[in-house]
Amino acid sequence: MLKSLDQHLYVLSTLALALMIQQVVAVEWSTEPQAFPRVFGIGSGGILDEKFWLPMLTCAVTICALEVLYRRTLTGLAFLAIAEDNFAARALGLPERSLRMASYALAGMIGGLAGFSGGQLLLAFVANGPLLNFYGFVPVALGGLGNNRGAIVGGFALGLFQQAANFLVGGIFSSVAVFMLFIVVLLAAPRGLFGAHLARRV
Amino acid sequence: MAISSESAAGAMQEKSLAGIGSWVFAGPLILIFCLALLVPFITNDYWVLIATRAAIYWVLVGALNLVIGFAGQLAIGYVALLTLGAYTTSVLVAGNVSPPVPVFAALAIAGVAGAIFGVIVGLPALRLRTFYFAISTLGFATIITQIALAWQSVTGGGIGLPGPEMPAPFHTHAGFYFFCLAAAGLITWMTANIAYSRFGRGLIAVRDADVAAEATGIRKARLLMTIFVFTGASAAIAGGLFAALQTYITPDAFTFDLSVLFFISILIGGRGSILGPLIGTVILTLLPEFAAPLAAWSTFLYAVLLLVIVLVAPGGIAALLDFGNRRALQANRTIVPKAALVGHLLAMDKAKSGIALRGVVLSFLGVRAIDGVDLDVEAGKIHGLIGPNGSGKTTILNVISGFYGPEAGSIALGGQALKPGDSESRASQGIARTFQTPRIVGEASVLQNVMIGGTIQRPKHIRRIASLFAPASPRRTNAAIRSDDRIVRGRAGKSRGHSRGPAAT
């Protein structure tokens, strides 16, 4: 299926599938927030509660695993090659299609893991979708697309900024502040704060 | 030389390329409009309401079509501007922040607010590509809804507030319907004027071949921002009308499903068409009415429709209806070069000044690609630039055509310094370039591709705003550009091929 698609059609088919899944979830399990079961049941109450340390632990493990994958294994390098220059990568005999499939599967897995570990804190709630989409994307854009370390720094910066804005100007306007920051940073540093240099286009 | 082979069919096709003013293009739109005029006379109030909704959606979708269908920007969060317009109009009419404002003044203010926020939503489009821009518009949509919920003193929070009441004669169902239909007709006319003038060709060029667009003098940022202003204003006015239709608005009325409807209407309609998205809007507005038990699944249906279109007919409804371009080309076509015309063209546009490079230096990280180049290109002579691979030939061309700004040194045309790194200004100074790999607008015909070169030939009296309302001026400009092009083709109508597919880059 993926073979015949242009770049923009890729995006659209992804969007279509996402909407379908979202709708099925909404209709099957209602749009009300649902409680999420405890996974391990270790540490109850206080700041040592599972719902706080589990997401952090998952996040740290994911970061380390991705760093190892991209820097130490041939498969990770192959992913990078496909992303960087798909024609050159194919000329070297890399199986583009299966690598793309694998990268999608990996991204899906990490997404699922994130939902699983964050579930208890955020509740299972359909309306989380757009907000998570946006807050998941902002740090990536701020840090520089395709730059894991930049995304981590961007994520921390965004979290701190948002909480500070929450404290200073109140709940409503904190998301407005985040959006303004996002636009201002993009206009000042189009490639993100740690983004790669502009590739040769001509 | 085969000069007299222009057939009647060829002439017809030639005309339809001009777009506006051609019955092939305008006929179906006028037919739909006439049918829509009949709705209140042959059906009941319920269907009039549905038709009103379709007309209001089209006010938004018609304008958004320029952003998505022509400029290729995946703006999925446009419900945000609908919300903004609906709340601005309702709040102003209700007098929550100021003395109550008359409905039409409130609509106009909403339009201005929409234009401003349209630019804010659109700004990331200059930096972000495809999916990333889509997400930033989505973020804006989320935030607008949150503000509507939280700013209770003005918006009424979750309880909402009443929509504006239209004055007579637009207070009846039919009256309001005709008002919305007039707005929809106006939007169609205005977008057609943009889409089929050099602005529309410029948008398509930005979408499909942005580097080549720069080289032909299309100013991407300015063009996109103009379109975002127009779309923002239209979307906000649609929002005001939507609030009047709903009679009472709450944040729940502006779900993401609406955004999906707008977005998918355009995609199933087909990119670069006006008729297709119009049909798409009507279909998607009607769909839940015919599938009432499936109302909860409407987004699912839209998504399935989108997936089917993407996989089966990526060109959308417009491509299915585009009978003209699917006709097989005449067999044994030959392309006969006309050497005599080259001389004619060269005589028309004689180069009067040379290009001079002095001490130009440019390096990429550790590689010094050009190191103090002095070069004189003399007027009226053909020069060759030769050298081994990696010696910096292309880099020099890129510096001259403004794609790279040199670290040191200067470039001058006829003694006047050229602004370094400003590729969009070169075409108007008379510098043209080609590329190592052809950069062609794959979805446009050969003639349209050639006409993109006419972007910089703007008559002085045409301003952007004027072109919204004056179909005559784009038509005249188009005719002028086409006749230039015909000089090249010797009025033979020989090369009127539509290059779908093979020319795509």
Image (tube, coloured by chain):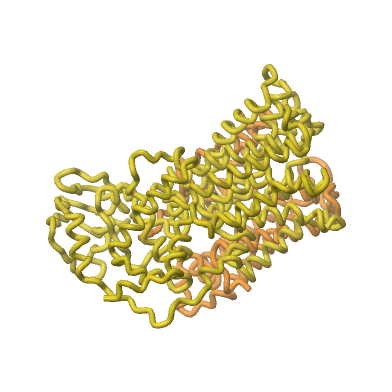
Chain colours: A orange, B yellow
Using the image as rendered, state which of residue A71 and residue A3 is in the foreground: A3
- At 44% across and 45% down in the image, what residue appears? B472
Looking at this rendering, what residue extends furthest in the top direction? Answer: B99
Considering only vertical position in the picture, is B116 above or below B432?
above
In this figure, what is the number of numbered marks?
0
Using the image as rendered, state which of residue A182 and residue A47 is in the foreground: A182
- Quadrant housing the N terminus of chain B: bottom left
Using the image as rendered, state which of residue A200 and residue B444 is in the foreground: B444
- Quadrant housing the C terminus of chain B: bottom left
Looking at this rendering, what residue extends furthest in the bottom direction? Answer: B332
Considering only vertical position in the picture, is A113 above or below B226?
below
In the displayed structure image, the side of residue B249 where residue B116 appears, left or right: left
Considering only vertical position in the picture, is B462 above or below B70?
above
Residue B328 at x, y percent in the picture: 49, 77
Instruction: Name the image quarter holding residue B109.
Output: top right
Using the image as rendered, state which of residue B17 and residue B100 is in the foreground: B17
Residue B362 at x, y percent in the picture: 25, 54
Instruction: Name the image quarter holding residue B86.
Output: top right
Residue B189 at x, y percent in the picture: 55, 46
In the displayed structure image, the side of residue B196 where residue B132 appears, left or right: right
Residue A3 at x, y percent in the picture: 58, 74
In the displayed structure image, the side of residue B374 where residue B140 appears, left or right: right
**Taking the image as drawn, is residue B293 in sight?**
yes
- At 73% across and 48% down in the image, what residue appears? B38
**Taking the image as drawn, is residue A122 in sight?**
no
Instruction: Name the image quarter holding residue A10.
Output: bottom right
